[in-house]
Image (cartoon, rainbow, N blue to C red):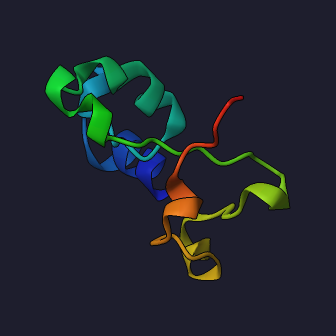
Amino acid sequence: SLLVWIDNFLSLPHTTPDRRLGVWENVLQTTHLIPEQLRGRVVIKGFSAGSTAGKPQKHGAFDEVEFWRREFWQPEDPR
């Protein structure tokens, strides 16, 4: 992805928090840095790799989904 390319070739991140946040591996390793008073207002959404059910599959595919609708980005109830 472009974000990985930027991290590897155009910048020199010394630690994981210095990397771009759009890569799932970087997100998982840095969520603890979100201030506690903001955590209830932050939603992190991941998409299944290789499955069309979890659209979009590429950064440019967000025009195929209604990402502004709460149903798109709201986590599903685990019950």
Residue positioned 41% across, 20% down in the render: 29
User: How far across and how far down the image is residue 74, in percent?
Assistant: 52, 51
Residue at the bottom extreme of this rendering = 63
Residue 49 horizontal/vertical position (percent):
75, 46
Residue in view at x 69 percent, y 61 percent: 57
Compare residues 47 and 77 and report the one nearer the observer.
77
Vertical relation: 62 (above or below) 14 = below
Q: Position of residue 5 (x, y in %)?
A: 45, 50
Residue pictured at 82% horizontal, 58% vertical: 53
Whether residue 13 is visible here, answered yes or no, is no
Q: Nearer the viewer, residue 14 or 40?
A: 40
63 shown above or below 40: below
Q: Is 76 in front, or is 29?
A: 76
Res 73 visible: yes
Number of residue marks: 0
Q: In this view, which residue lies farthest toward the front?
A: 79
**The N terminus appears in which quarter of the rendering?**
bottom right
Q: Is residue 66 left or right of residue 29?
A: right
From the viewer's perspective, tell me whether residue 41 is left or right of residue 49.
left
In the rendered image, residue 45, in percent from the top left (x then y), is placed at 53, 45
Q: In the rendered image, which quarter contains the C terminus?
A: top right
Q: Nearer the viewer, residue 79 or 12?
A: 79
Q: Residue at x 56, y 76 (%)?
A: 66
From the viewer's perspective, is 43 left or right of 32?
right
